[in-house]
Amino acid sequence: MNFGIVTFPGSNCDWDCYHVVTKVLKKKAYFLWHKDTKLPALDCVILPGGFSYGDYLRTGAIARFSPIMNEVIRFAKSGGTVIGICNGFQILTEAGLLPGVLMRNTNLKFICENVALHITNNQSPFTKSYPKNAVVHMPIAHGEGNYFADQETLNLLDGEGRVLFRYEGINPNGSQRNIAGIVNEKGNVLGMMPHPERCAESALGNEDGLVLFRSLL
Amino acid sequence: MNLEIIKQHGLTPDEYENILKILGREPNMVELGIFSVMWSEHCSYKSSRVYLKKLPTQGKQVICGPGENAGVVDIGDGLVVVFKMESHNHPSMIEPYQGAATGVGGIMRDVFTMGARPVALLNSLRFGAPDHPKTSFLVNGVVAGIAGYGNCMGVPTVGGEVFFDECYNGNILVNAMCVGVARKDRIFYARASGVGNPVIYVGAKTGRDGIHGATMASDVFTDETEEKRPTVQVGDPFTEKLLMEACLELMKGNEIVGIQDMGAAGLTCSSLEMAGKGGVGIEMDLAHVPLREEKMTPYEIMLSESQERMFLVARKGCEKNILKLFNRWDLDAAVVGHVTKGNQVFIKNGGRLEGILPTLPITEKAPVYKRPVKKPAYLKKLQTSPIPLLTKEGGRGEVSYNDILKKLISSPNLASKKWVYQQYDYMVGTNTVVLPGSDAAVVRLKDPHTEGKMTRKGLAMTADCNSRYGYLNPKRGGMIAVAEAARNITCSGGRPLAVTDCLNFGSPENPEVMWQFREALKGIGEACQALGTPIVSGNVSFYNESKDGAIFPTPTIGMVGLLDDVDQHCTQWFKKEGDLIVLIGETKSADPVDLGGSEYLKEIHHLVQGQAPVLNLKKEKAVQSLCLEAIKKGWICSAHDCSEGGLAVALTESCITGPRVLGAEVAADSKKDEILKNTAFLFAETQSRILISLQEKDLQSFLKLAKLKKCPAQVIGYVVRDRIKIGQLVDLPPEELKILWESSFKQKVIERLCAE
């Protein structure tokens, strides 16, 4: 299985994802430069965390206009697997591949912490290796993770089982309905605020994120 | 040119005379501005050099000591660690967000300019009293600034300290430390060479921000401080992230001959220093400098401290490739000059010659002062003041050690700093193996930092200083700062390697401050020598005073240690019920002298007096050696050094600061009414003590090793589930202490709800 990891100006977690894919999963990964206009043959594209374009205007607002995003959108529309992590999630909402927006955390501060997540739906390709209703722990690190969408959209997401992760116990950022991660209608595009690539190795004391990657293989 | 202009530039009449001699004529305004910043205390170290040169800076692990942008230490496996700490005190007092942010930006540039990718950031912050009207505002701004810059750069902020004391009311301290990793065969220095080689400017455009920032940092605060706002630089971490990636990419090749970041005194400093170090000259044309503002004068261009800019000398012929690389990263890049023969920097602007500066008299041969020193008058009285009556606390009857412990654990200096570090991304990079909250942070090393080199090694790092000890006894204060840093590194499983120092003091024109400086350095030197940790980089910040007086002597020590196998790291919290608790070192419970300068004395009696604790370096070495070896043998479940708050606080921290709250039952060999003895036993800050926990099965082997190393160590109790009991003196539920510990910082500093 081949992964492509996009590097926008300001992406920080690209290497973290590259490490998990190549050293932990032992699969092939390519760095995709934001100015590229062609994708190599890939099974999965990852939009990693970071501060693409310095979060200027809005988080992810400018990245969505990068040349490579045309290809990523095309890839997603044709059924390719796409994972947007943190800033990646923000970019996916700006690009229209996922509904809703990520607003500033309610406490107005950046929060770096391990949080408890409820696996709301373990039938998707991203979560099928998690036990049903599992509660796992993953780190979050963001200033704008407060998910918002109108009631109609939220009801749709709930109704179609498109919420994969919800904050369990404590909602760190004020997200509507405790939403931490969602998929698109076709179920091939995932956007999530927590960082699965930061909890994919025993050396770091937590492998709850590895299960997500293994689900895809 | 008149006296007023010279004074405004921070130059003394003598210094001006010297300038006339050097140039053989009067300087023009551009040249005067350049001398002004280069000879400022901040850039020239004129008051500190005589003492700095006495510090131990060598060792077989040292590849590059003080004098370059950062220190370089060999860690084996073809890799080096590159690190430095710097102050940004004055700008942070004026504009806390940008002052702190640009401090972080500047220290990162100092590291990656040497070819090292930053792997971690730390910071040591000192603010005024928690209830001082400005404190909450400053804390919010500084923390947000550090977070804003470091997080955007994608470098984890993994450790540090936050302290409060009245002495910082008019002058806060923000010391930022950066640690990076590079390949041993790919280190870059700030030396220009090769006549005809192009000089290239890369990074952000130059604007009018920060002009005379260096001069501002070399002066005390007055009521006119607010007016100095334009001297604070403004940072753009996004640009620096691009700059860092572009530079590190360029550094994979061999186009660069020398490179330096533009920090204090901007273009002036980097051009003069690089030429000076290389024994060459440079000719520059300011018309080629990318500008952000219109109609900037040569004076402004040379003195601007606009951030996120680098100055490099490249091999002739490489210009095109270099410009192309930086343009790919959407950064400005321009050839602004070339290296010449001789020892002068020629500054042109288009066709006009704007200034000619000789390099060596300005840099290598800048003024060096041996300022008068005088032992402070306050010291004798303070050191011999008796430890106050501890008999009845507030006259309310029996002393409640429970209450004292609760008060200490919830004081801003000892309370949990999670409110602070939760705003820092401490996990980005997926290298942080020991997160903030333990004695020292530990990071593992892998790509992209190791650039293909394989290693199992890890780095432990910490920043420490107890400035109260420094105030009571600068020499001991300096020694203890080093010893404590090394102890923290040891408790995490690291072998202390080397030091970067950030020396924060009052005005060097005050003989008592100079005396403190001299003594502190003596202590630091002695401890570094004894513990085998040479000083490889550092920073001096003088003029930290306001109308309220000078700050306490605050020689912050940043230390890096090496773990041969990063998996063998250790943390400070107890792991499970039934484990034995052992104290390595001695507790002179009968001696109240070690209560001098203690957190206990400050928090309960509101006093800073007495003698700073004694430090015996030989004993310290034995204690650390025992602890480290035992950790490597896998016998240690937890290790925590005893510092502020003494044994009782260290024990409490071992119980409540980890993911699992546990309790402890520890013996105390005194009777309930022996108040002095009890207080000293619980809260004295006696040095060279480490609190460890281990399993019963490893006890005998451990004690045998202790005996071999002639190091005192004794079992004092064991880990239990849900009570903290110290003899007849303390009996508390750990959960209650944890709640106090976790909630106090926000309550007492940010929201200022302390009921005193």
Image (cartoon, rainbow, N blue to C red):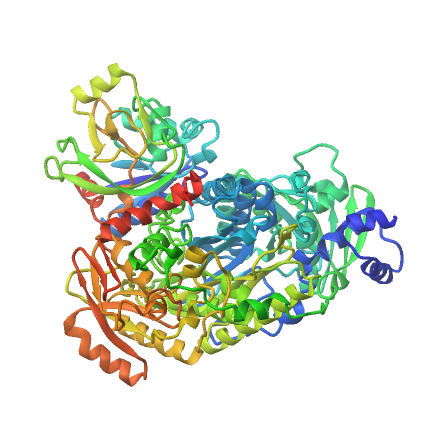
Quick one: B708 or B82, which is closer to the camera?
A: B708
x and y percentages locating residue B220 in the rendered image: 67, 51
Residue at the image point whose x is 62% and y is 72% from the top:
B53
Quarter the C terminus of chain B occupies: top left
B385 is higher (above) or lower (below) than B437: below
Look at the image and tell me whether residue B566 can be seen. Answer: yes
Look at the image and tell me whether residue B79 can be seen. Answer: no
B343 is higher (above) or lower (below) than B55: above
x and y percentages locating residue B299 in the rendered image: 76, 44
Quick one: B495 or B220, which is closer to the camera?
A: B220
The answer to whether residue B652 is left or right of residue B325 is left
Q: Quadrant of residue B326?
A: top right
Q: In which quarter of the image is residue B433?
A: bottom left
Q: In which quarter of the image is residue B160?
A: bottom left
User: Given the current orientation, which residue lies at the most extreme top position?
Assistant: A152
x and y percentages locating residue B482 in the rendered image: 47, 68
x and y percentages locating residue B121 in the rendered image: 45, 53
